[in-house]
C-alpha cells in the first residue's frame, strides 16, 4: 500500500439469496491534516495561517514544544479509512498547498520543516 491510495475491505453479511458485490475498494489520496496526539483522538489542528497563492491556497501550521506528539494523518476520498504517521519531535512548521481549481480542497504538495537549531 502506498499513501496515494488506501484499500478497504467491506465485510457484508447478506440475507439468503443475496450476493456480495464489490467488497474491495481503492480510495484516492486527497490530502493530509495535522493532529496533536494520535489521530484516533481526533484533535485535528486548524492552520495558523492561510493565504491565496497562484493556483490555489497555502496553509501553514507552527508547532510548539509540547509533551504531546504531532501526527500527520492522510485523507482519502469517500472513506473514513486513513493512515497516520508521528512527526519527528523537532518539527517546527508544516505547509500544505491546495489546488484552487477544484471545488473541494485537494492537496497538491505538503512539507514539514525542522525547528531552527540553537
Image (tube, grey):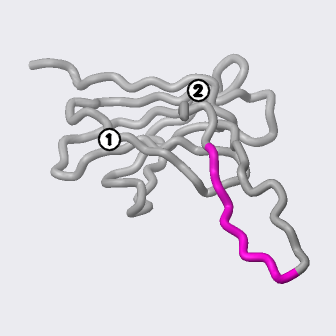
Picture coordinates of residue 92, whole percent (x, y): 28, 30
Quick one: label 2 or label 1, which is nearer the N terminus? 1
Q: Circle 1: is it few (<14), some (14-19), or many (20+) Cα within 10 Å?
A: some
Residue 62: x and y, percent? 35, 36
Q: Residue at x 48, y 36 (%)?
A: 49
In what quadrant of the picture does the N terminus appear? top right
Compared to 100, does 7 lie above or below?
A: below
Asked if 79 appears above or below 97 in the picture, the reply is below
**Residue position for label 1:** 86
Residue at point 71%, 51% (across, down)? 24
Please tell me in which quadrant of the rendered image residue 4 appears: top right
Of 40 and 15, nearer the camera is 15
* Secondary structure state at the residue bearing disc 2: strand
Question: Measured along the vertical axis of the image, is residue 75 above or below residue 80?
Answer: above
User: In the drawing, does residue 113 fall left or right of residue 8?
Assistant: left
Residue sticking out furthest to the left: 118
Query: Magenta residues?
Result: 7-16
Query: Residue 13's x, y, as percent?
Result: 72, 76
Place of residue 88 in the rendered image (x, y in percent of width and height, measured from the top left) = 26, 33
Per the image, the residue denoted by label 2 is 97
In the picture provided, is 43 more to the left or to the right than 87? right
- Pointer 2: residues within 10 angstroms few (<14), some, or many (20+)? many
User: Which corner quadrant holds the C terminus?
Assistant: top left
Q: Which mark is residue 48?
A: none
Q: Nearer the viewer, residue 94 or 26?
A: 26
Q: Is residue 63 magenta?
A: no
Residue sticking out furthest to the front: 17
Overall secondary structure of the magenta stretch? loop
Alpha carbon of mark 2 to alpha carbon of mark 1: how far? 20 Å
Q: Is residue 56 above or below residue 48?
A: above
Amino acid at each position: 500500500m502506498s499513501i496515494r491510495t488506501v484499500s478497504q475491505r467491506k465485510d457484508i453479511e447478506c440475507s439468503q439469496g443475496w450476493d456480495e458485490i464489490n467488497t474491495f475498494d481503492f480510495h484516492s489520496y486527497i490530502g493530509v491534516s495535522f493532529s496533536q496526539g494520535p489521530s484516533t483522538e481526533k484533535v485535528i489542528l486548524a492552520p495558523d495561517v492561510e493565504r491565496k497563492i497562484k493556483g490555489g491556497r497555502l496553509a501553514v501550521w507552527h508547532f510548539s514544544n509540547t509533551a504531546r506528539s504531532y501526527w500527520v494523518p492522510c485523507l482519502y476520498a469517500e472513506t473514513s479509512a486513513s493512515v497516520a504517521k508521528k512527526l519527528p519531535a523537532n518539527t517546527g512548521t508544516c505547509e500544505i498547498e491546495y489546488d484552487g481549481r477544484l471545488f473541494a480542497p485537494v492537496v497538491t504538495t505538503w512539507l514539514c520543516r525542522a525547528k531552527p537549531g540553537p
